[in-house]
Amino acid sequence: MTPFAECNVTTYLLAIDQGTTSSRAILFRPDTSVAAQAQQEFPQHFPASGWVEHEAEDLWRSTLVTCHAVLDQAGAQASDIAAIGITNQRETTVVWDRKTGAAIHRAIVWQDRRTADLCARLRAEGHEPLVTERTGLILDPYFSGTKIGWILDEVPGARARAERGELAFGTVDSWLLWKLTGGKVHATDATNAARTLLFNIHTGTWDDDLLALLRVPRSLLPEVRDCAADFGATRPELFGGTISIGGIAGDQQAATVGQACFQPGMIKSTYGTGCFALLNTGTTAVRSRNRLLTTIAYQLGGKRTYALEGSIFVAGAAVQWLRDGLGIIANSAHTEPLAEAADPAQQVYLVPAFVGLGAPHWNPDVRGAMFGLTRNTGPAEFALAALESVCYQTADLIDAMNTDWASSGIAHGTPVLRVDGGMAASNFAMQRLADLIAAPVDRPVIRETTALGAAYLAGYHAGIMPAPGRFADSWRLDRRFDPSMPAETRNAKLAGWRDAVRRLTAP
């Protein structure tokens, strides 16, 4: 295989990174440097309390616009692109007409909680052990399966049409793949399939018992492939020529690849709208005793690598709340200096359960609250509480992961957390994170790790990227944040956080 640094410099890899609030395209050179990037936000829709939707066409149009923008910036043509890799907001659910390619309902976003009652009923009926055994997940509205059922039941005629094979389901990767290929390819990868409540992560197949439980017709489902595989080619009219599509992974798994977390025991955490920490557990699907998820980290050559995952619903969204909900800041960059000016004597805690609490609590019914307010509490303390809320939630995840990992009997060394995402740019937040998890935090030189992971997978399939071990050698450290907070202070702050969570979640 040709080392990636020796490839033709005019050969690019195009990464599509379709996220919760915006779509991005990044054009990577074969040495992983960025040649061009573009981003476009799209509207969010909140039709009821706890409901979050996107127009599926907005996801497609914004993706297409950003792809054209990066090609124009780089002066590149379709023939200059070796392959496209796709990474996407996971669990977000689209159902569309196979003939027209039109979605039959807005996409239901991963944050959406409308199926909480259904999940509670299924748990009460005793179905969760089966779901967890097969999928590594829990019964929660976060995942795609109950969203599919809601669409089929609420859109007139949809269930009958699905039974007749007229409709298709996909997470956003499948939706974009369908549009890019002109409906020729209806497929997904193992990491996205693993987030549906319908996929057996041990056999690597759709599960008939789970399909029956959630009343999802098999005819809706995409074909499941490796993360680096032949996913077809784009319609020539889109970019003036065909481009092969060679990689797909859900955003958190793509970030795991981009962070080169290929060895068991390595942990990464991505700070976007939410926060997602993944611990590579190798070929062992470790069963969590702390309500973490067991999931597929990536699948290459038919071989699945597993991970423990902790999902936090609100991370960067807490900063957005400061900006859009309270008007405390004009933009996210103002959060850090404001937090640095906070009164250290005040212990203000924000529990940002705006759409419920994720791991390890998994409580969809609670809502956000602040504790410890005084007459002296002001914008600076609110900013600090927002940033610290992300660190506290990460600490909960890391503690649960370490406990599960230790109980698995698989030896591992001292954990180092690799970070990426928008909040990772904040030195203050990353230092506070290291202090509160009592472990080093490593920030890479290339922070676009989600897109880089998608690009790597596409390049690996195209033969211009090396095997995972050699790709890991290219990972470069920008800065390490070592914990410096006294243990007494850290323990007191964590105790205050856990007390705040208990007050919020107590019956």
Image (tube, rainbow, N blue to C red):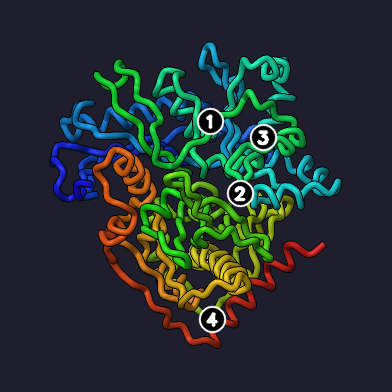
> Does 277 sit above or below residue 28?
below
Would you say 481 lies left or right of 387 here? left
Secondary structure beneath disc 2? loop
Q: Secondary structure at mark 1?
A: strand
Q: Which residue is mark 3?
A: 147
- Which amino acid, by three-letter code, is at mark 3? Lys
Q: Which residue is disc 2 drawn over?
A: 202
Question: In x, y percent, where is residue 66?
Answer: 32, 32
Q: Nearer the viewer, mark 2 or mark 4?
A: 2
Whether tag 2 and tag 4 are in contact, CB under 8 A, the answer is no
Instruction: Give the Cα separation between the discs numbered 2 and 3.
Output: 23 Å
Q: Secondary structure at mark 4?
A: helix
Query: Is the residue marked by circle 2 packed among few (<14), some (14-19), or many (20+) residues within 10 Å?
Result: some
**Closer to the camera, 383 or 253?**
253
Residue lying at 69% horizontally and 40% vertically, measured from the top left = 49
Nearest the eye: 255 or 324: 255
